[in-house]
Amino acid sequence: MRTYRDEAVVLRTHDLGEVDRIITMLSRENGRIRGVAKGVRRSKSRFGARLEPFTHVDVQLYQGRSLDTVTQAESVQAHGSVLCNDYPRWTTGSAMLEAAERFTAEENEPATQQFLLLVAGLRALTDGQHDPGLILDAYLLRSIAVAGWSPSFTDCARCGANGPHRGFHFASGGSVCSECRPPGSSSPRPETLRLLGALLSGDWSTAEASDERHRREGSSLVAAFLQWHLERGLRSLRLVERT
């Protein structure tokens, strides 16, 4: 048994017994971890408010056989206090937390890049730097890329022919030329593919100049691409799409 310390973002919580709570977190060094926060639901708890979803914490845990035990937590940035007052940003953040958990399926497997992406995405949401929908699509595209499924929005994903191309096929990895285009490929607008390429590369000036209809089409492509690779969609995205 050992004690260890790490930075983490709280993804979700659920109650355990009468006063305890299980905290699921994505950490910098140890990937996705779960820890029991004992007595955290008591009104006099020392760090209950620091272990809520959206909170970036410096946390210390004691390693257990099945679940670790949270022994200390210091808040680095409490995004939830800001996001809870803005429904579109809260639903966007909820989708990001759910995606982060889905992209780290194995517990205690280091996922530093996914952690850094989530921290940067939540900070952008809290600061109001960009439109929430654009932040979410950029986060999802980059998470997909980190997971090893980076989509192509210009050159053909099959043969590498220089693009842009009109065809788009999820199973093939993105844009496809007329020679490689499989049955069932979609034909998104060129402006939509340009927007998605800008979000993936971090070209925010191009992304923010995009038209609303291209943003809607782009969000649909991102959601479908995500569902293809994760084999089921994110439940939180349904709330985002209604806003």
Image (tube, rainbow, N blue to C red):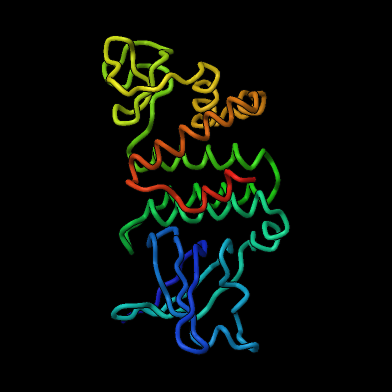
Is 119 situated above or below 148? Answer: below
Q: Quadrant of the C terminus?
A: top right
Is 178 situated above or below 34? Answer: above
| Nearer to the camera, 2 or 122 | 122
| Nearer to the camera, 102 or 9 | 102
Who's the residue at 52% across and 20% down the image?
A: 194
Who's the residue at 59% across and 40% down the image?
A: 135
Who's the residue at 63% across and 75% down the image?
A: 49
* Outermost residue toward the right in this view: 85
Give the image location of residue 24, x and y in percent. 45, 68
Residue 140 falls left or right of residue 133: left
Give the image location of residue 114, x and y in percent. 43, 49
Residue 64 falls left or right of residue 207: left
| Nearer to the camera, 122 or 235 | 235
Who's the residue at 64% across and 48% down the image?
A: 125
The part of the image, by quadrant, that contains residue 148 is top left
Give the image location of residue 142, x and y in percent. 46, 39
Residue 216 falls left or right of residue 150: right
Q: Quadrant of the N terminus?
A: bottom left
Give the image location of residue 55, x and y in percent. 58, 64
